Amino acid sequence: MQIKPLTTTLSALAISAALAASSGAALAEGLTITSWGGAYQTSQDEAYFKPYTAKTGTKITQEEYNGEAARIRAMVESGNTTWDAVDVDAATAQQGCDEGFLQPIDYSKFGGEAAFVKGSTFECGIPTIIYSTIYAYDADKLKDGPTTLAGLFDTKKWPGKRSLQKTPFGNLEFALMADGVPADKVYETLKTKEGVDRAFKKLDTIKKDIVWWEAGAQPPQLLASGEVVFATAWNGRIYNANKQDKKNFKIVWDGQLMDYDLWAIPKGVKDLAAVYKFIEFASSPEAQAAQTKYISYGPALLAATPNIAPDILKDLPTAPENSKTALANDPVFWGDNKEELLKRFNTWVAQ
C-alpha cells in the first residue's frame, strides 16, 4: 500500500475545503426576484418568498421596479443579468418574447398550459395572478343597483356621472359588450373599422356624463364623495376600500376585463434550474391559494381555487360565479393597435 506524503494530503484537504466554501457561497447568493413593491409584493413575500426560503434554505433578495421593460432589456444586452425572475405585466411578457430578452417558458414543468386560466399563458411568461377592471357603485347610496355591464351605459334607469379610466383600453371592450357583442368576439370586432366605430358610438351615449380618472386611487374616492354613481376600477382598489375603509361598494363582475401578472425569466440568468424550482413552488396550488389571504387577486392556476376559503373566494375575479362572462385582455391586439386607437381616443375625448 502506497502512503501519500503529508503535504499532498493536506493540499487535497485544502482544495476540498475551498470547493465546499465555494459551493456554500454559491448557495448563499440565492435568487434575486423583482416585483412591483407595495401590498402586492408583500403578498408575494408572505405566500412565496418566506415559505420558499424556509423550505429550501435559498436566500431571496427582493428588488422593486415600475414595470420598465427597458431595464430588463438593458440588463440582458449588457451580458450581466442580475434579476433571476421578474413579475411582469402581459404587455412586457409579449414584448420580451418578441424582442428576445425573456426566456421561453417550459410549461411541461407546470402541468402544461391547460393547467392555467384560459388565455393567461404566454410563451415567455407563466401567469401568477389575475386581476380585473370592473365597475362598482356605492350600495349605501344606490339600493337597487345594476347586475350587468349594460347598466354602466343606462343613464335612464341610473342617471348620474360615470367615472372611466382615461384610456381606450377597457373602455372599448366594455362598450362593445354592453352593446351586445359576446366576450369571445370583442377583439375580432375591434379589428375592424366598423367594430371600432361601434364602440365609440356606444361611448357617445354616456360621453356627457363621464368623469375621467387617471390614478387607481381615484375611483373609490369619487364613489365615496358621491360625485359619480358608477366607476370603473381595478377590483383590488374596491376590495381594499370595503375592507380597510369600511365602505359598502358593490362590484359588478359581468363583463369584467381580466388581466395578468406573470413570472418572467430574463435571458442570461446564471442558474436557470434554480429559477425554475422557485417558480414551480410559486405555481403550486397551495402557494397560489395562500396569496389570496393577503390580496384580492385570483390565482392563475386552476387547481388553486379549491384551496381558497369561500369567504375569500367570493371577492376574487376568478371565482366561478364572478368569471362567467369575463373577457381576457389581448395584449397582442393592443400591441398592434394601441398607437392608432390611443390617437383616436384622445381626439374623441377632446371633441
Image (cartoon, rainbow, N blue to C red):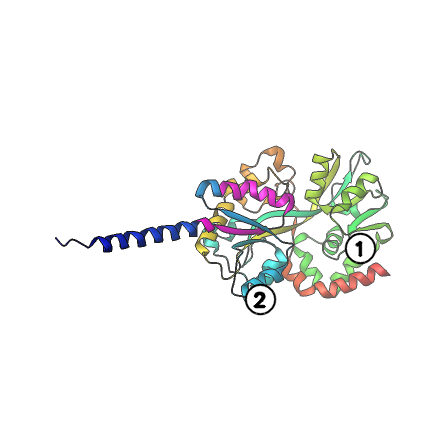
Q: Position of residue 337 (x, y in %)?
A: 69, 64
Q: Position of residue 240 (x, y in %)?
A: 70, 39
**Front-most of 93 and 38?**
38
Q: Is disc 1 placed on a helix, strand or loop?
A: helix
Secondary structure, mark 2, is: helix
Q: Which residues are magenta?
A: 28-52
Mark drawn on residue 33: none
Amino acid type for the residue under numbered disc 1: Lys
- Residue 111 visible within the image: no
Specify whether 134 is left or right of 153: left
Residue in the image at 79% along x and 44% along y: 230
Question: Label 1: how many residues lie within 10 Å, few (<14), some (14-19) or many (20+)?
Answer: many
Q: What is the count of numbered marks?
A: 2
How far apart are the two marked residues, 1 and 2, measured between alpha carbons? 36 Å
- Where in the figure is residue 174, as x and y percent of width and height? 73, 52
Instruction: Specify the principal SS of the magenta part.
Output: helix
Query: Looking at this view, is 197 or 230 the one in front?
Result: 230
Q: Which quarter of the rendered picture does the C terminus lie within?
A: bottom right
Task: Name which residue lies at 57% across and 41% down.
Answer: 291
Residue 266, compared with residue 256, is above or below; it is below
Residue 74 visible in rendering: yes
Above or below residue 235? Residue 183 is below
User: Which label number is shown at residue 202?
Assistant: 1
Task: Work out whether residue 253 or residue 179 is closer to the camera in this orientation and state it.
Answer: 253
Q: Residues within 10 Å of mark 2 (few under 14, many from 20)?
A: few
Residue that appears at 14% across and 54% down: 2
